[in-house]
Image (cartoon, grey):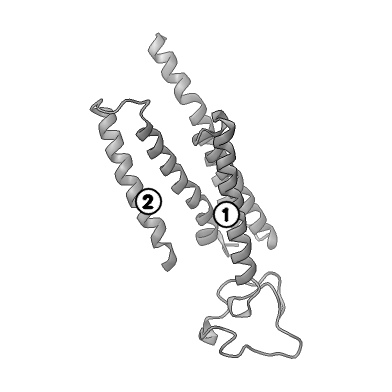
Amino acid sequence: MRRCWPHAVHLTVGIGIVAVVILELKRRTLPVEATRFEAVALYWHLVDTIWIFLLPMLYLIGRS
Amino acid sequence: MNEAGRSTLKLWRKPSLIWLALMLLLALTVGSAYIPLGIGNGLVNYGVAVTKAALVVVFFMHLDRSRALIRLAALAGLFWLVFLFSLSFGDYLTRDWNGSATTLAPGKKELATHERGNFPKERLPLVPRFGSRD
């Protein structure tokens, strides 16, 4: 558990930049086709993929 | 339905279906975790995890409509990860102080301090051993 803090840092950064992008899209200051929009989405999915493997390792192991 | 509505529906349809598949796989993995299957629990859990990761990477990260060079770059990353994980787990899971998959040598009752890396005896093993040797 203690070694999960890097994932928490990635997640915090992800929530921050996703929030900024949502705000920019709402204000229409960022076009949907922008490379930055795609890069933020890719980063978010990367963190998600890591979580997909952390879930069974941390929470599902030894349940039965 | 007007043109904008149709294009919105088209935009949301595929991601929603993939999201639904991800939720079903999540239900499968959480549900099966409470059923005692022995080594099967690990197989189901990590099998489902690999499937979910493949769905995210292929569809959400748009590898399904990427150029060959980009797919190749993603595959190279995956290939490198396989090296890192197989070497790390090959090391950790065969060490006795970490509750290794291997068993103690015949006639050997417990580990010396240097073999368990200064871990207190009552905290060993850190991960469950595969199968029982008791």
Give the amino acid at mark 2. Leu
Picture quarter with the N terminus of chain B: top left
Instruction: Identify which residue is drawn at 73% across, 85% down.
Output: B105
Residue A11: numbered disc: 2
Q: Secondary structure at mark 1?
A: helix
Residue at 61% across, 50% down: B79
Q: Position of residue B93 (x, y in %)?
A: 63, 70
Q: Quadrant of residue B58?
A: top right
Q: Residues within 10 Å of mark 2 (few under 14, many from 20)?
A: some
**In the displayed structure image, the side of residue B118 where residue A17 appears, left or right:** left
Query: Badge 1: few (under 14), some or many (20 or more) residues near its Cα, within 10 Å?
Result: few
Which residue ends up furthest to the top in the rendered image? B2
Give how far across and how far down residue A16 sits, in percent: 29, 45
Q: Report which residue position mark 1 lands on.
A: B81
Q: Position of residue B72 (x, y in %)?
A: 59, 39
A56, above or below B73, in the image: below
Which residue shows up at 54% across the image and 36% down it?
Answer: B70
Three-letter amino acid code at disc 1?
Leu
Report the mark closest to the observer, 1 or 2.
Answer: 1
Subunit under mark 1: B
Front residue of this view, candidates A47 and B78: B78
Q: What's the residue at 69%, 62% (across, down)?
A: B39
Marked residue chain, label 2: A
Which residue is situated farthest in the front direction here? B69
Identify the secondary structure beneath mark 2. helix
Looking at the image, residue B87 lies above or below residue A10: below
Say if labels 1 and 2 share a chain.
Answer: no
